[in-house]
Image (cartoon, rainbow, N blue to C red):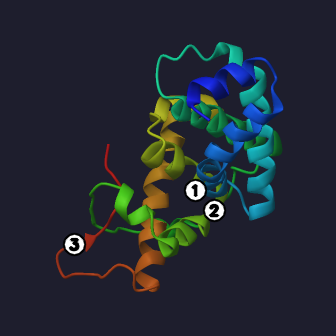
């Protein structure tokens, strides 16, 4: 089914069109939810709630961009709303994990595709993981993140810095990254 037919069908509450849309986009959107959730069950709950919003907000889609991007934005905001509602993004972590580590930053997409790195990101405390996902992966600014999470912009920045440092330590411990004498090679994008 073409995207145009799916959209038209979804706007008219045609179950087969809704099923086609869900089938096409749910695997990628589950990956988005999985990065924010503690476990697969939570991710699946976020996905379901997100797609309910997608279907109810479908009349607002104006076609001024990719449908997948529009769906992704709804899913991300749904994940954040669920975390905010449950206050799961607030984690206290010892500053020892954010020690003085020299970072040589590169771009993100290739490294985060690997299962080991995604699992390492999931080991981060919820607050660190949430800010890292929103900033480095989803492309939100620290200002936008602070508004979404109802935290200070400086808190978003410090959580991002600490998340990178902690993730780097996890990746080094798992021997995914190597320490060099000058700098540690790190694969989270700088902005």
Could you give the CA–CA distance between mark 2 and mark 1, rounded to whole angstroms? 6 Å
Disc number for residue 8: none
Residue indicated by mark 3: 183
Q: Quadrant of the C terminus?
A: top left
Q: Which numbered disc flags the more N-terminal residue, 3 or 2?
A: 2
Disc number for residue 125: 2
- Cβ atoms at labels 2 and 1 below 8 Å apart: yes
Identify the residue at image location x=73%, y=55%: 43
Disc number for residue 129: 1
- The local secondary structure at tag 2 comes to loop
Whole-percent x and y of residue 190? 31, 49
**In the image, 128: left or right of 150?**
left
Identify the residue at image location x=60%, y=50%: 32
Identify the residue at image location x=65%, y=23%: 7
**In the image, 67: left or right of 34?**
left
Name above or below for residue 35 compared with residue 135: below
Could you give the CA–CA distance between mark 1 and mark 3, rounded to whole angstroms? 23 Å
Name above or below for residue 136 compared with residue 41: above
Residue occupying the far left of the picture: 182
Whole-percent x and y of residue 72? 58, 37
Q: Quadrant of the N terminus?
A: top right
Q: Quadrant of residue 11?
A: top right
Q: Quadrant of residue 148?
A: top right
Q: Closest to the observer: 189 or 116? A: 116
- The local secondary structure at tag 3 comes to loop
Any part of residue 87 in sight = no
């Amino acid at each position: 089914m073409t995207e145009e037919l799916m959209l038209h069908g979804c706007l008219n509450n045609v179950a087969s069109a809704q099923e086609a849309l869900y089938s096409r986009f749910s695997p990628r959107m589950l990956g988005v939810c999985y990065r924010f959730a503690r476990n697969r069950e939570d991710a699946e709950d976020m996905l379901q709630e997100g797609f309910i919003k997608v279907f109810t907000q479908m009349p607002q889609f104006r076609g001024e961009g990719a449908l997948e991007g529009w769906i992704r934005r709804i899913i991300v905001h749904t994940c954040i709303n669920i975390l905010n509602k449950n206050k799961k993004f607030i984690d206290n972590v010892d500053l020892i994990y954010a020690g003085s580590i020299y970072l040589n930053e590169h771009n993100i997409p290739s490294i985060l595709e690997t299962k080991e790195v995604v699992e390492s990101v999931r080991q981060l405390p919820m607050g660190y993981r949430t800010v890292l996902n929103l900033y480095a992966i989803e492309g939100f600014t620290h200002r936008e993140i602070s508004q979404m999470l109802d935290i200070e912009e400086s808190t978003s920045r410090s959580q991002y810095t600490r998340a990178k440092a902690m993730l780097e330590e996890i990746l080094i411990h798992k021997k995914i990254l190597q320490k060099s004498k000058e700098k540690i090679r790190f694969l989270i994008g700088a902005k």
